[in-house]
Amino acid sequence: MLSNSPTLDGVSKWCSAIECAGSKDQKKAVRGAMLPTWWNVWLERNKRIFNNITRSEREVAYITKQDLDLLRLAFRPP
């Protein structure tokens, strides 16, 4: 494991800290944003390893923002 890689314990503490901060709606928004973010990071990792395709951090962030905007649009109240 690389020295700057997060450990499971570190990620767990980070998630616990999120649960202690903010209102119920803020917590829900942060948790909702974490899943698409991690998903896009995971996809980028797989593309780099298995397909030898690399995108910049900015491109991955832009794709993640697009995903979050689509989720917000899909689940907005009528």
Image: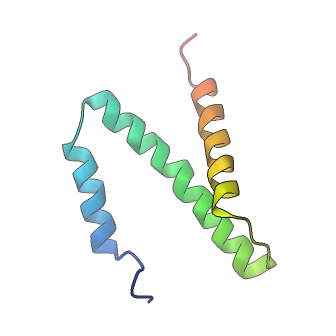
In this rendering, the answer to whether 42 lies above or below 68 is: below
**Residue pictured at 27% horizontal, 48% vertical:** 18
In this rendering, the answer to whether 77 lies above or below 65 is: above
In this rendering, the answer to whether 23 lies above or below 53 is: above
Q: Can you give x and y, in whole percent of width and height, for residue 61 in the image?
A: 62, 52
**Residue closer to the observer: 20 or 3:** 3
Number of numbered callouts drawn: 0
The quarter of the image holding the C terminus is: top right
The quarter of the image holding the N terminus is: bottom left
Q: Name the side, left or right, on which 74 lies relative to 14.
A: right
**Residue closer to the observer: 78 or 53:** 53
- Choose top left, top right, bottom left or bottom right for residue 28: top left
**Residue pictured at 33% horizontal, 28% vertical:** 25
Judging from the image, the colouring scheme is rainbow
Q: Can you give x and y, in whole percent of width and height, for residue 20 in the image?
A: 19, 45
Q: Can you give x and y, in whole percent of width and height, for residue 43 in the image?
A: 66, 64
Work out which residue is located at the far top of the displayed protein and give it: 78
Q: Can you give x and y, in whole percent of width and height, for residue 65 in the image?
A: 62, 42
**Residue pictured at 41% horizontal, 35% vertical:** 29
- Choose top left, top right, bottom left or bottom right for residue 11: bottom left
Q: Name the side, left or right, on which 18 lies relative to 32.
A: left
Q: Name the side, left or right, on which 15 lies relative to 30.
A: left
**Residue pictured at 48% horizontal, 43% vertical:** 33
In this rendering, the answer to whether 59 lies above or below 53 is: above
